[in-house]
Image (cartoon, grey):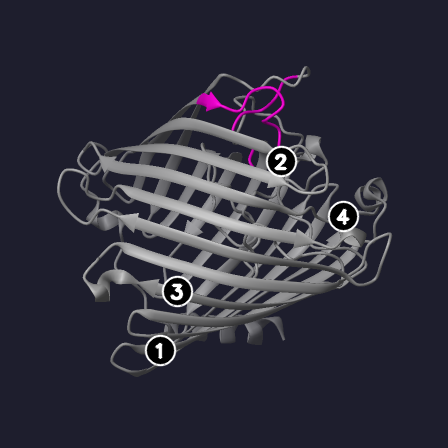
Amino acid sequence: MKKEISLIALSLFTALPAIASQQSDSQGFVNDSHLNLFLRNAWINRDYQGGVQDKAEWGQGIVATFESGYTEGLIGFGIDGIAQYGVRLDGGRGRSGAGGIDFFKQDSEGRAKSDLAKFGATAKMRISNTVLSYGNQRPQLPIVYADDSRLLFESFTGTMLTSREIDGLEINAGYFTDEQRKSDDRHNSGLKSLSFGGASYQFNDQFSGALYASHVEDVLNKQYLGLNFKQPFSTGQQLVLDFNGYNSRLDSGYADSLNTGRSNSIWSLAASYIWDIHTFKVAYQQSSGSTGYHYGSYRDQGGVGDGGNTIWLANSYWSDFNGEDERSWQASYGLDFAGLGLPGLSWTTAYVRGDNIKTSATSNGKEHEWFNQVQYQVQDGMAKDLKLKLRYSVLRVSSNASDYNVSGNEIRAYVEYPFNIF
């Protein structure tokens, strides 16, 4: 039986199209090297309701990333490096400290860091189209995603394997032993170990899927399934269906520390209709089980430790609509102003409403959010790729669900400028 399974698997892989070897095309350690600089000025202000103190942070970040090429030969070797520096422009004692902002970590007396410097390096080797690396890692996977949406970048330390030997198939696996907080320069955030693996596959031009699993030691096991289907109708029109789902089971000790249950299943299905410069989207999201969906934050802060953006769900804006037994609906509209003679300018608005939230006070808590974002990216000239982004959210949560979430108004203003040095 095992022999038959092996032969079937071998025949499937040999039938799939292989792709040209990237390592064979290597131009060497120096010739394929790149140094990039990324400047980000970011401000987030949260005006909380219900007597909760308002929070705001403002900072300037500079991120330099170096990626070497690979040495020539059957096996190529290389080194990557990253240097991050952030300076606090506002948000000292009393205004900083919101977990959802987290630009600069506070000390024991409530004072936010005035500046922040972080460094990391990665050693890598490549055979054909498979890369094995160790060191500073910034994965962007649905099962572990290093948060890059604030001032500086979150990162992990460990080993990661990425393989693209077959056309359309990407395999990822890794083992991390450390998580570095985006707002701090120390390396130990309480993570013992995080192991993960999975793959994504582009079946054809219209259909793709992904399947991943992870294990965070002493915290949880998690599985993810993602499916995406695109159906073009005519020039400038397209229907996109996007499914994302997670199944999680918490460690008993971790669940007891939170006084919650252990199991959660959450999924979302979004349908987007793209008509020329317009995008219309509707989505439904459902959480079930004995606890809400847990992700992100840091182990020494009572969080999971799998990355601040590890929630690939349709109804995730300021709120993630991930409470225990919560169900939510979304209606969204997007406009690309390129068709109106303003390339690079876009606007998105969305309304999400959730109910059936189970808390200690109720089995039908409610929340709703109105989200708006305007973004402009310079198309050419000296400031090419300079991006301006303004985001505004209004979130309201029923009083009987206050131990799950909190009401407020949020403004985010970002100015980002990436450019290549060589």
Lower position in the chain sequence, tag 1 or tag 3: 1
Residue 33 at x, y percent in the picture? 23, 35
Q: Which residue is mark 2?
A: 99
Give yes or no for residue 57 being in the magenta stretch.
no
Asked if disc 2 and disc 1 are in contact, CB closer than 8 Å, the reply is: no
Assign the N terminus to one quadrant of the image: bottom right
Q: Who is closer to the viewer here, 105 or 228?
A: 105
Assign the C terminus to one quadrant of the image: top left
155 w.r.t. 210: above or below: above
Per the model, the C-alpha gap separating discs 3 and 4 is 31 Å
Which amino acid, by three-letter code, is at mark 1? Gln
Q: Which residue is mark 1?
A: 238
Per the model, the C-alpha gap separating discs 4 and 2 is 16 Å
Q: Quadrant of residue 5?
A: bottom right
Secondary structure, mark 3, is strand
The part of the chain drawn in magenta is 88-107
Main SS, magenta residues: loop
Q: Quadrant of residue 74?
A: top left
Q: Which residue is mark 3?
A: 334
Q: Who is closer to the viewer here, 176 or 2?
A: 176
Asked if disc 1 and disc 3 are in contact, CB closer than 8 Å, the reply is: no
